[in-house]
Amino acid sequence: MATPEVLTDLDAADTRRQVVKKLPEVTLAFWIMKIAATTLGETAGDLFSQTLKLGYFLTTIALFLIFVVTLVVQLRSKRYNPFFYWTVILSTSMAGTTMSDFMNRDASGKYLTGGATSLGWGPQGLGMGYPTGAAILISLLIAIFAIWKCTGLTFSIRDIVTFRAEALFWSAILVSNTLGTSMGDFLSDSSGLGYAGGALLVSGLLAVLVALMRVPAVPNVLLFWIAFVLTRPLGATAGDFLTKPLAKGGLDLGTAGSSAVLLAVLIGLMGYAHVQERKDTARREETLAGVS
């Protein structure tokens, strides 16, 4: 006869922590939403900066301010809310897109689309190039993780419940999404792989990470953060594939149309996640009430 499951004091403490969690569980649905959000971040960032001709400079400022507003809402929330969380992910993806473009590109005509002769007001790029931009972003990400390590706070997303840990988490997310954009643009524009080839390469690397999850010596937290960075170039190459002209290997669906479809998909996924979270929270609270 099977032994009945026993809920220990440690289990009860874990249940209490999960009831007030601030960030989502990392599941397959989490990664699907992450890729959808980062793909939308790519197409929406290009929509504002290129299609609407606001330019990288003005768009970066505007999208960074949007990121700050969405982040404040998320930080002030007392528990995990899928709409709050994924809105911040989307805002970091959009801001990361134009921040990367502003760092790596210059004002030359090769980066203009739709017959534009100029973009917006102000400098349109620092012209650092992808290697230099990536080196700076990697250094920033390492610095954030070093500070995070010195605080003694956990790197595990499911255990992040304090304001300081969450602030470090979102700092790492913003930089990693910007870095991922640079990687995606390099694969699409400069590596010779093209949009489909870049997406296949990143997908292969993600498959390797999934396989490494079965290796006990490799920490899952490390795999999570590597995967989080790599899903951004997957979104970037997918976004470029949807929006770029046929002559460049894209589907030429346009930034506006692609963004509208992706936004509808993401809102639908957020709605589903919200319903599931309410069900999970109710179950955890019932379990907690049963052991009180």
Image (cartoon, rainbow, N blue to C red):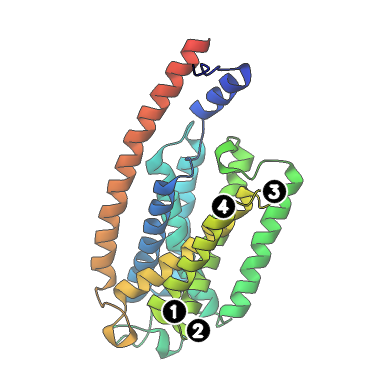
**Which residue is under mark 4?**
224
The picture places residue 55, in percent across and down from the top left corner, at: 40, 75
How packed is label 3: few (under 14 Cα within 10 Å), some, or many (20 or more)? some
Tag of residue 103? none
Residue at the image point whose x is 58% and y is 50% from the top: 214
Q: Nearer the viewer, mark 4 or mark 1?
A: 4
The picture places residue 110, in percent across and down from the top left corner, at: 41, 89
Q: CA distance from mark 4 to mark 2?
A: 26 Å
Tag of residue 148? 3
Residue at the image point whose x is 26% and y is 78% from the top: 252
Amino acid on which the number 1 mark rests in the picture = Ser
**Which residue is under mark 2?**
191
Q: Is residue 100 visible?
A: yes
Question: In the figure, 57 relative to 107: above or below?
Answer: above
Report the side of 165 relative to 95 (left or right).
right
N-terminal label among 4 and 2? 2
Amino acid on which the number 3 mark rests in the picture = Trp
How packed is label 1: few (under 14 Cα within 10 Å), some, or many (20 or more)? many
N-terminal label among 4 and 1? 1
Report the side of 258 relative to 151 (left or right).
left
N-terminal label among 1 and 3? 3
**Which residue is under mark 1?**
188
Q: Nearer the viewer, mark 4 or mark 3?
A: 4
How packed is label 2: few (under 14 Cα within 10 Å), some, or many (20 or more)? few
